[in-house]
Amino acid sequence: MCGIVGYVGPRDSQAILLSGLARLEYRGYDSAGIAVIDGEGDLEMRKRAGKLQVLRDDLTAHPMTDGTTGIGHTRWATHGGPTDANAHPHLADDDKLAVIHNGIIENFAELKDELLADGFTFRSETDTEVAAVLLGREYAASHDLVAAFRTVAARLEGAFTLLAMHQDQPGLVVGARRNSPLVIGLGEGENFLGSDVAAFVEHTRNALAIGQDQIVAITPQGVEVTDFDGHTVEVEPFEVVWDASAAEKGGWSSFMAKEVSEEPEAVANTIRGRLSDGAVTIPELDGLDDLFLGISRVIVVACGTAAYAGMVGKYALEQWTRVPVDVELAHEFRYRDPVIGPDTLVVSISQSGETMDTLMAVKYAREQGAKTLSICNTQGATIPRESDAIVYTHAGPEVAVASTKAFVAQITALYLLALHVGRVRSVLSHEDSAQAVRELEAIPAKIARVLETEQEHIEQFAGWMADTNSVLFLGRHVGYPIALEGALKLKEISYIHAEGFAAGELKHGPIALIEPGQAVFVIVPSPRGAAELQKKVVSNIQEIRARGARVIAVAEEGDVSVLPFADEVLRIPLAAPLFEPLLAVVPLHIFAMGLATAKGLDVDQPRNLAKSVTVE
């Protein structure tokens, strides 16, 4: 959740830190702060509760001296409320040491008692200040920041990324990570640290991924990475495949508006280079045929929107591989003692690759002997490195907290995986594979058509519905997870009650919610590929319309069966039933964004939410 930036080099660190923190605002936060070692060798710090602009205004009113070593942080409150005192950085060792932290230190209370017994005092309610004071004590004994860091990191329990600097050692920033993201940016005569490559992509696209339980020391001259025992370790280099402009609004009213417009591109980029002669071949999965031949079961673990992508993917995986698939919420998975083993493939889905619940599910699966595969949008992330295999989506940076283009990219990646495994297992005929590939290749243009023909209409009636306080979503088969996604998106950014149901479940209880004027979105299957299912959904529409509901149908072009019963019809292009979710979700994303905008809400940074949930 929190944003972290570190810098050493010849330039003004304040500008670099503030720019990096601005690029990390999407992660969700409630306070911000920076610390620099100025030209006189003194450590200066400034932090403020509220948005980054509050800190900027404070620095404008009360400037700090420029320096070339610095760390910066945006905090999402866990221990202690969002106050100036609880904001990061935290100081220790007579205010000569500054520390920032992402994650939760689970044993902070016993460490704090130990420090209080030694006569140390505290100025905040945070677990982070405990780590800072502990580090200050160790540094005072050794006068070696890296060695002190190693000692402290070994004593901490929980999830953490820590960055620290000391005014006695200018030109040095030290970081440590456990179960929380940290990446290195490599420059010429300068180096960077960040919780995300967005922190430094403006300055360099050359990066290194730090592994679990490792410590990094950056200076202008170089980078050294060791484990917690002090042994030098090799780190994996990678190039960031997007530039800084990709994470900018570029004239759009919001990042979410920009990212919805990029949904066709997200699908196109995810399939690029993976389709050939009517078949799917995923280069990242070369050499893994034995893994796929040896599985008898697939479990998809994910949270929120990613879990709904997994529910859509379940239909494709089972149809094209004939392997049974379960979809589970990652935060429930390991606590129920699931029955898994070497013939189980656990597929994790995470846009950031740092979702803590999903990461811990992956680790548990590996401990139980299962094979693991990650679907992820972020290079250098933790979950892919913890997995046996990886299929990257190529949606580009997604800045808005509520996921849109990453969702369609995740579904696309799951379809590619299903087609790849179906070919490897000789389940899918070449003809069926070729037909699926043709459908998939046509999706980007079809999504673009939805945006072109329906967006203005949807935004208009979303504006009319700005005072609505409850919306229901219904779907069957692959339309059911799309109904769940539509409801989640509306909840996330408009703060109104929204709920998704399997349409057939309606008569088993939820129909009691229907009253005159109740808005209900219905995902209508194609009458061509799923005629019987389509008839059932039309019957569901008649049931709720008879009770006074206002029906908004999402139906394919040419489907006239819904016209007598729907108040609004949102059209999507023709597609085979399995591929309709990639089209049907687009109007729901537009609607949620349009209604939230009409209410005057911030669609990019909804209250209480963070883009990357790095705590359990």
Image (cartoon, rainbow, N blue to C red):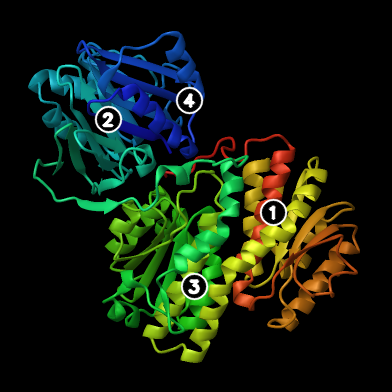
Instruction: Give me the C-alpha separation between circle 4 and circle 1.
Output: 34 Å
Kind of element beneath mark 2: strand
Instruction: Give me the C-alpha separation between circle 1 and circle 2.
Output: 45 Å
Residue 7, numbered circle = 2
Tag 3: amino acid: Tyr
Instruction: Give me the C-alpha separation between circle 3 and circle 4.
Output: 40 Å
Relative vertical location of residue 225 with respect to residue 562 in this rendering, above or below: above
Q: Earlier in the sequence, mark 3 or mark 2?
A: 2
**Residue depicted at 69% across the width and 41% down the height:** 596
Residue 52, numbered circle = 4
Instruction: Give me the C-alpha separation between circle 2 and circle 4.
Output: 18 Å
**Residue depicted at 30% across the width and 26% down the height:** 71
Kind of element beneath mark 1: strand
Q: Earlier in the sequence, mark 4 or mark 1?
A: 4
Residue 415, numbered circle = 3
* Left or right position of 322 against 495: left
**Residue depicted at 45% across the width and 76% down the height:** 418
Q: Earlier in the sequence, mark 1 or mark 2?
A: 2
Q: Earlier in the sequence, mark 3 or mark 4?
A: 4
Q: Position of residue 20 (x, y in %)?
A: 38, 33
Classify 10 Å Cα crowding around label 4: few (below 14), some (14-19), many (20 and above).
many
Residue 499, numbered circle = 1
* Left or right position of 564 against 75: right
Tag 1: amino acid: Glu
Kind of element beneath mark 4: helix
Relative vertical location of residue 430 with respect to residue 146 in this rendering, above or below: below
Q: Earlier in the sequence, mark 1 or mark 3?
A: 3
Classify 10 Å Cα crowding around label 3: few (below 14), some (14-19), many (20 and above).
many
Classify 10 Å Cα crowding around label 2: few (below 14), some (14-19), many (20 and above).
many
